[in-house]
Image (tube, helix red, strand yellow):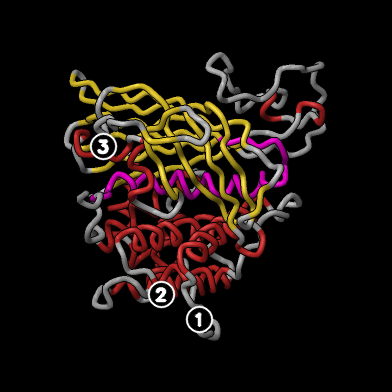
């Protein structure tokens, strides 16, 4: 990525010359009335809609896309544009990078990007949609070997370079989220396989380029497949300030995905412990979490779980790691009603390691259900949750 940043400067210096070779006139489509925000549920639906449209542009229509129906991409952009909070600004820029990296030639994507650009400084010349579209096109053209995730990181860096740091957000760079979703049907002949796809098993080693790896081939009798997202990013904030935020006790303090988390007694029903550990300190125990995802018609599927967790802080090197795995499910609800869909896998970690003035962050999360009905929604959710690690790492939690 360092070479990408170096080449970016050269590309931008030659923008005037390159522009003559790649004219891309932009004409915005008809404007519509901005939809009402509708609160957290609609914000999540809008964000996941952006991710769904970007994914469809790259992979084609998803035939398993039954649990989540995306709102039109321009409507989703308007919802994201309405939020002027620091978290809203992070998501707006990320949406621009997602859509542009997926397919900048799509008229509806260009209309959506124009809406999203409305949140930038009007005095900045790159707030002009036509110039910004041209700039993005030139930068992508200069990196023909960059894959999808590299393009997203490149454009995320470009937006930070052109518009500066988001007020209230720590500077970050090279935000990259890769997602291993449910496999598609393959015609590859593989030997009989009885080992399930299980990223939560520490002995399981995933081979992404092996079509016969259990996580790459659908085998009906082995059941639904878990989804895994891995995010890496560098942020200009000390490890010591990030550690309390990465502790699971703080997950509900920033963002929209978690309703509540706390250090818990593994009882039924769960109860908070008498003396909660200091977030970011060394401790081991049980964490209660309540989180949700958006499904068809923007209904929320809500899940409550108990996790076995380990919080580890070190000084040499300066680092922090929060690891978790499913202890037991507590409840599952769809549109506030109990559902038979249960979480079977919920594991991962958040880590922060000092790297000069920057902190290198890695976030890995796996979720698996006992039904494939939510596979597609989960793929979109984990993509968004992975990118949201920047929101968490920039958070200033409220004073108790």
Q: Which residue is mark 1?
A: 28
Residue 372 covered by magenta stretch: yes
Q: Which mark is residue 244?
A: 3
Q: Residue at x 34, y 38 (%)?
A: 249
Look at the image and tell me in which quarter the N terminus lies. top left
Which residue position holds label 2?
Answer: 129
Question: Can you see residue 137?
Answer: no
Q: Is residue 327 left or right of residue 10?
A: right
Per the model, the C-alpha gap separating discs 3 and 2 is 39 Å
Callout 2 crowding tier (Cα within 10 Å): few <14, some 14–19, many ≥20: many
Q: Position of residue 278 (x, y in %)?
A: 24, 32
222 w.r.t. 170: above or below: above
Q: Which residues are magenta?
A: 367-396
Neighbourhood count class around disc 3 (C-alpha, 10 Å): few under 14, some 14–19, many 20 upward: many
Q: Earlier in the sequence, mark 3 or mark 2?
A: 2
Pick whichever of labels 3 and 1 is earlier in the sequence: 1
- Asked if one can make out residue 171 in the rendered structure from this viewpoint, the answer is yes
Density class for disc 1 (Cα within 10 Å; few <14, some 14-19, many ≥20) is: some
Residue 254: which disc? none
In the rendering, at what x and y percent does residue 361 appear? 33, 35
């Amino acid at each position: 990525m360092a070479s990408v940043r170096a080449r970016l400067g050269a590309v931008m210096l030659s923008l005037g010359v390159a522009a003559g070779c790649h004219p891309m006139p932009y004409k915005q489509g008809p404007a519509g009335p901005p939809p009402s925000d509708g609160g957290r549920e609609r914000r999540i639906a809008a964000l996941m809609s952006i991710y769904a449209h970007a994914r469809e542009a790259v992979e084609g229509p998803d035939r398993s896309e039954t649990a989540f129906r995306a709102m039109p991409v321009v409507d989703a952009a308007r919802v994201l544009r309405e939020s002027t909070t620091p978290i809203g600004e992070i998501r707006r820029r990320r949406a621009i990078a997602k859509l542009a990296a997926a397919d900048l030639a799509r008229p509806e994507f260009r209309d959506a990007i124009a809406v999203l650009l409305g949140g930038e400084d009007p005095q900045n010349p790159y707030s002009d949609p036509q110039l910004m579209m041209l700039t993005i096109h030139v930068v992508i053209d200069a990196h023909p070997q960059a894959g999808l995730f590299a393009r997203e990181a490149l454009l995320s860096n470009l937006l930070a370079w052109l518009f500066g740091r988001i007020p209230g957000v720590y500077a970050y760079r090279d935000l990259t989220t890769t997602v291993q979703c449910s496999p598609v049907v393959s015609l590859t002949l593989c030997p009989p396989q009885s080992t399930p796809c299980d990223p939560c098993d520490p002995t399981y080693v995933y081979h992404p380029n092996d079509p016969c790896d259990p996580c790459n081939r659908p085998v009906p009798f082995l059941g639904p497949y878990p989804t895994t997202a891995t995010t890496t990013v560098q942020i200009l904030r000390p490890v010591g300030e990030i550690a309390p935020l990465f502790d699971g006790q703080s997950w509900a303090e920033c963002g929209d995905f978690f309703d509540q988390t706390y250090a818990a007694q593994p009882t039924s029903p769960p109860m908070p412990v008498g003396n909660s550990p200091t977030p970011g300190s060394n401790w081991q125990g049980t964490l209660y979490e309540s989180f949700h995802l958006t499904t068809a018609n923007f209904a929320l599927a809500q899940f409550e779980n108990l996790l076995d967790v380990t919080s580890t802080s070190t000084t040499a090197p300066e680092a922090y790691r929060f690891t978790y795995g499913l202890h037991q499910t507590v409840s599952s609800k769809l549109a506030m009603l109990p559902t038979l869909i249960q979480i079977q896998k919920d594991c991962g970690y958040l880590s922060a390691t000092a790297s000069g003035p920057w902190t290198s962050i890695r976030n890995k999360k796996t979720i698996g259900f006992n039904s494939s009905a939510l596979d597609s929604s989960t793929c979109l959710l984990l993509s968004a949750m992975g990118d949201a690690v920047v929101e968490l790492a920039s958070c200033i939690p409220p004073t108790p």
